[in-house]
Each structure stands twice: as C-alpha cells, then as structure tokens.
Image: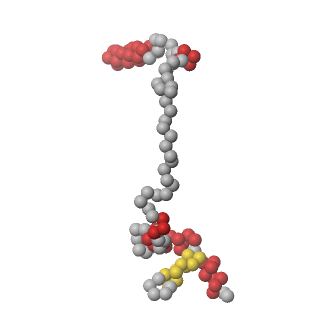
Amino acid sequence: MQRNFAILGLIIATLGISAQAQEPAVPTPTPQERVLTVPPIAPDFRPEQKPLPELGRVGVELDRQRPLPLREALALPYDRPCPEWTRQLEEEIGLIRRKGSGRSLVWQLAAAATSRTHV
C-alpha cells in the first residue's frame, strides 16, 4: 500500500514539474516589435526584354495533321465493353440489348425501344 502511494506521489511530482517547465520564460513579442529592415538586393535590376515564344507547337506541322478515328483517339484498353458494366447499365437505366448486324450488339433505352415497336 505504501508502495502505491510512493508511485502516485512520484507521478504527481513529475507532472507538477513538467507543467512549470512549459511556461514561457520570455514573453512573445508583439507584431509591432518584429519589424525587420531588409536591404534591397538589386534596386537597379531590369530584366532583358525578350520576344515571346511562337504560339505553334514545336515539332508539329499543322498542315500535315490527319484526323484520328474515334477508336484511335480514345485508345481504350479493351476491345469490347465489360460484361459486368453493361449488365449494371441494363438494370439501372433500362438498356435493352439486341442483335445488330454481324457480330455486333445494339443497346437501346427501354423507352426508345417500346416507342419504335408501337409505331
């Protein structure tokens, strides 16, 4: 029991000492006291006036450009849509999958598909 009181007394004494050590000895200066006088480094410096660079792209001949097909411009990392993604869209926004020409598939919104069948 006396040992517990001794440990408790040491803890309280250390906390009291550390609390006193955290108080600042010198008051912090106010902003008016912090005025610094910095000498000018190069008061007569004037940068050399250079012409601005050309607006065209360097190494690109604009008259020899050709339009890219959409597939090349997008540079998608896959050849066909992800099955999970298309199933999710079919459920969320009501896409209907239909057979197109050849191996292609055509998706239509459910509202557009029903209006075409009733015409």
- State the quadrant of the C terminus: bottom right
Furthest-left residue in view? 3
Residue at 36% from the left image edge and 15% from the top image edge: 10
Number of disc labels:
0
Q: Is residue 73 left or right of residue 109?
A: left
Query: Can residue 19 be seen in this snapshot?
Result: no
Horizontal side of residue 93 vs 119, given as left or right:
left
Residue 113 lies in quadrant: bottom right
Q: Quadrant of residue 12?
A: top left
Q: Quadrant of the N terminus?
A: top left
Horizontal and vertical percent position of residue 36: 51, 18
Residue 5 x, y percent position in the rendering: 36, 16
Residue at image position (49%, 23%) is: 40
Give the answer, above or below, for where 49 lies relative to 119: above
Residue 64 visible in the shown view: yes
Question: What colouring method underlies this structural image?
Answer: secondary structure
Q: Is residue 27 above or below residue 51?
A: above
Q: Is residue 65 left or right of residue 118?
A: left
Q: Nearer the viewer, residue 110 or 49?
A: 49
In this view of the protein, which residue sits in the foreground, 11 or 43?
A: 43
- Residue 86 image offset from top left, x and y in percent: 49, 73
